[in-house]
């Protein structure tokens, strides 16, 4: 593993830890502090569908996520982490309550790393939201 790959994985793992804490608690500040000013977020559906740019838009997105999953969304398993010199992908399982309904899902999130910051996020999911 190259030094760039090691740094990417280290930074992405820290961001993922802050990300899962935000999902569970709604406290997104540690995660948001790790983002570049030109951060981009890609989401596959809903009012944030497609490309979203900037930290403020990202804050709106994650506040919306916590509102939708109140009292929180919990990581129940980390299935795989894959990384290279610039990107790390985390495949995981989570569960909670989505707008009053029990929710379980398998998700993949991708973090693009620049230096010691996250400059991009992409999320992919495809289950029915009720099973793994």
Image (cartoon, rainbow, N blue to C red):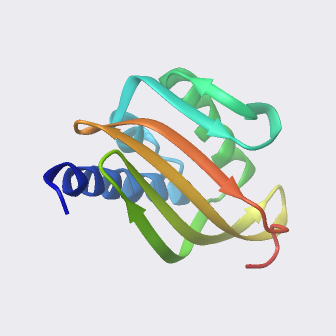
Most extreme residue toward the left is: 3
Q: Relative to residue 97, is residue 11 depicted above or below?
A: above
Name the residue located 63 percent from the left edge and 63 percent from the top edge: 107
Left or right of residue 42: residue 86: left
Name the residue located 82 percent from the left edge and 74 percent from the top edge: 130
Q: Relative to residue 60, is residue 62 depicted above or below?
A: below
Which of the 4 image quadrants contains residue 114? top left
Residue 62 place in picture, x, y as percent: 59, 40
Residue 129 place in picture, x, y as percent: 80, 67
Name the residue located 79 percent from the left edge and 68 percent from the top edge: 127
- Quarter holding the N terminus is bottom left
Left or right of residue 55: residue 18: left
Residue 74 place in picture, x, y as percent: 57, 68
Q: Nearer the viewer, residue 43 or 85?
A: 85
Q: Nearer the viewer, residue 16 or 9?
A: 9
Q: Relative to residue 34, is residue 107 depicted above or below?
A: below
Which of the 4 image quadrants contains residue 41? top right
- Quarter holding the C terminus is bottom right
Name the residue located 35 percent from the left edge and 43 percent from the top edge: 30
């Amino acid at each position: 593993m190259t030094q760039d790959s090691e740094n990417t994985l280290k930074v992405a793992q820290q961001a993922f830890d802050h990300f899962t804490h935000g999902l569970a608690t709604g406290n997104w500040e540690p995660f948001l502090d790790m983002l570049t000013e030109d951060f981009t977020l890609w989401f596959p559906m809903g009012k944030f569908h497609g490309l979203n740019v900037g930290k403020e838009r990202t804050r709106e997105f994650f506040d919306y996520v916590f509102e939708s999953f109140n009292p929180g969304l919990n990581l129940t398993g980390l299935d795989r982490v894959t990384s290279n010199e610039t990107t790390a992908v985390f495949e995981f399982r989570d569960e909670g309550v989505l707008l009053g309904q029990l929710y379980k899902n398998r998700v993949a999130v991708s973090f693009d790393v620049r230096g010691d910051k996250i400059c991009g996020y992409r999320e992919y999911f495809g289950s029915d939201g009720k099973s793994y």
